[in-house]
Image: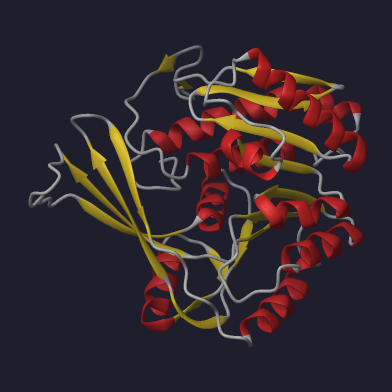
Amino acid sequence: MVLVVCLNPTLQKTLLFSSLREGEVNRTSNYYLDASGKGVNVARILGQLGVPAVHLTHAGGVFRELFLTLAEKDGLQVLAPDSGSDVRFCTTLLNLNKGTTTELVEEARPVEPATEKEVRGAFQALLGRVQCLVISGTRAPGYRDTLYADFVRDAKEAGKRVVLDIRGLDLLSCLPFRPDVVKTNLAEFAGTFQEVSPGGEQIRDQWVLQRVGEEFQRLARKYGVVFIITNGKEDTLYYNKGQVMRMPVKSKASDENIPGEEHTLPVLNTTGCGDAFLAGFLKAWREEGFPEPSSLAFQAGIEKYIREAHRVAYLNAVNVRPGRIF
């Protein structure tokens, strides 16, 4: 089982429009409401991939039961202490005419002081049941700055695999406890390690590749961590066998029902694609028994893990609702 921690739950509204007109009334009868947030998306897709997962979060306020009901409807196993703070809403506007995704994000309210103790207790109760810990997304206000680092320390001491999809101070505080894999995007990586500036969003730029490569090497030597950087439809960067590798992002997915065939579907909603990438990576890594990142097995398999991550991210993108591959 995989334990997915994300202390920032969301109720996600997805609205589809044939076109959007700013400054005017826009109406649609095509809309959805889902339990969401980065951790929910990872856990839901893991379940759809046949990987058992449990999600630890919090939920409070008048929308607590709605959030839990929607999660249960999707077959999610969720443990969510009552935070006393309302679950936030985020809204996705899909412009089908232009093929664009617009996100309207509400920031989280602070959790009540007693919430952290309950979350820590739930974490300790779950840790012995899982092979791998995933921490994804920012913390809602009200938690101590050391919380994620404490979780990583405890998981590594218990012999668990640890994967992070976080940034900034949360990531920096976790690195001394030697997580196994860190997945982030280029902007988050640059924002966390300020000496690395992306200089635009094209990771094909040789200057960017050189600076990222230098930082990859430093982090691998100091912490033994494997970094993977995504950048939308641009190449994915990862560190393997002492060098920076690149893998192009395909816009196709193999059709499992037709051997040797591929199909291309239009991208509808890019929300949650990073979470889908992470779930696909975990699924492929788990199939080989979660080998140690420094092992020959991992180094030989990482390209396959990332290829599966791309496939799953694409399947998420061609679905209207976030955190789903069918």
Q: How is the image coloured?
A: secondary structure
Q: Is residue 22 above or below residue 265?
A: below
Q: Position of residue 172 (x, y in %)?
A: 76, 52
Query: Residue 57's quadrant in the figure?
Result: bottom right
Q: Residue at x 44, y 40 (%)?
A: 325
Query: Quadrant of the image for the N terminus?
Result: bottom right
Residue placed farthest to the bottom in the image? 114
Q: State the residue in front, 31 or 10.
A: 10
Q: Residue at x 26, y 41 (%)?
A: 94
Q: Is residue 41 above or below residue 71?
A: above
Tell me if I can see residue 92 in this picture.
yes
Q: State the residue in front, 243 or 284.
A: 243
Q: Residue at x 60, y 28 (%)?
A: 198
Query: Quadrant of the image for the C terminus?
Result: top left
Give the side of residue 239 with respect to residue 189, left or right: right
Q: Position of residue 105 (x, y in %)?
A: 38, 57
Q: Position of residue 310 (x, y in %)?
A: 55, 28
Q: State the residue in front, 103 or 313.
A: 103
Q: Is residue 158 above or below residue 249?
A: below
> How many numbered discs sit on the rendered protein?
0
Q: Residue at x 39, y 18 (%)?
A: 263
Q: Position of residue 304 (x, y in %)?
A: 69, 24
Tell me if I can see residue 131 in this picture.
no
